[in-house]
Amino acid sequence: MEITVRVPGSCGELLQGELQGEPFLVTCPIGCYTTVRVSDAFTGIHGLGRKSLMALEKTLTSLGKEELPWGIQLTSDLPRGKGMASSSADIAATVAAVALAFGYEPYLDEIMRLAVEIEPTDGVFCPGVVRINHMDGRMLAGYRGLPAFRISVYDTGGEVDTLLYHANMEDSVAEEKSLAALTQFELGVKTHDADLIAAAATASALAHQQLLPKEGLEDFLAASRRFGALGINVAHSGTVIGVLWPADWTDRQLQQAEAELSGKFPSLTHLLQSRLQSGGIWVDKGTAGNFSEWFR
């Protein structure tokens, strides 16, 4: 028996805010993954952190099982505590891999329910780009056909405990700013306008400065635009900033712009470069590495 599941992380969120008293976020999945393998080729629990261990226990309980009779291993490309959905990816990949190993195919809302029982969740395991209530897991909207922005991920330093952040957060972004950003974003998606989408993400990032400020963000944005960026996005409850570059940029263009930006802002750490992509869950039921998308 061999099951391998992978779930992407994120570069923060494209948008986050509150409408009519309800919190929401719009996901920003990228090509960096958590991978969970369940196999009879080895034994024991390897690489699972506190939250993924909770996901393992909750999944076993929901299936009426007392223990996992096979080995399980988690590996991840995602830095921790940066707002890159590492915990959400870990939790979803663990739930899916364990359930599939027992021959059960959980619905997406079952995975979401288990995830939000552990912490406020990012919907990176949902297909496409989605808008969700990250506190209770309710799906609010789904979006397809977004531009595959090239994204440079920069870290401002430190870590943010997601559970503690949400537990202590009393204020929120003004609803009119949230509505304006979301309206602009949805118009951009409808008209396939990358500039509008990037502008909406930028507006959300700047509005969130009142809640979790990132020092020098406005200067960083101005410099990014001078070097050709369409805008920025941030981890609203984390430490990273994403620079949104045109999807058709070459590697050479991207590397040159990143070098200029990194030279101007040496206090920021360049973590990686990726692209905006679809979220989801990918499964390989063998050892050949042939992953297929589970939900479409």
Image (cartoon, grey):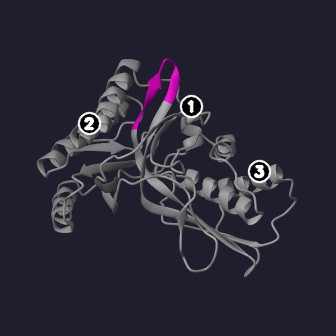
Residue 75, quarter of the rendered image: bottom right
The segment highlighted magenta reads 15-23
Foreground tag (3 vs 2):
2
Q: Name the mark on residue 158.
A: none
For discs 3 and 1, the disc positioned in front in the rendered view: 3
Farthest-out residue, front: 296
* Residue at screen point 73% across, 80% down: 42
Is 164 displayed left or right of 70 in the figure?
A: left
Residue 273 painted magenta: no
User: Could you tell me if residue 202 is visible in this image?
Assistant: no
Decide: few, some or many residues near mark 3? Use Cα within 10 Å; few <14, some 14-19, many ≥20.
some
Task: Report if the CB atoms under discs 3 and 2 are less than 8 Å apart.
Answer: no
In this view, the residue farthest toward the left is 226
Q: Name the residue at 82% across, 70% down.
A: 69
Residue hosting label 1: 168
Residue type at mark 2?
Answer: Thr
Q: Find disc 3 in the rendering and name its residue.
A: 58
Across and down, in percent, residue 30 comes to 41, 56
Q: Quadrant of residue 162?
A: top right
Q: Earlier in the sequence, mark 3 or mark 2?
A: 3
Determine the main secondary structure of the stretch shown in magenta: strand
Say whether residue 249 is left or right of residue 39.
left
Q: Secondary structure at mark 2?
A: helix
Disc on res. 191 = 2
In the image, what residue type sits under mark 3? Lys
Side (left or right) of 46 relative to 194: right
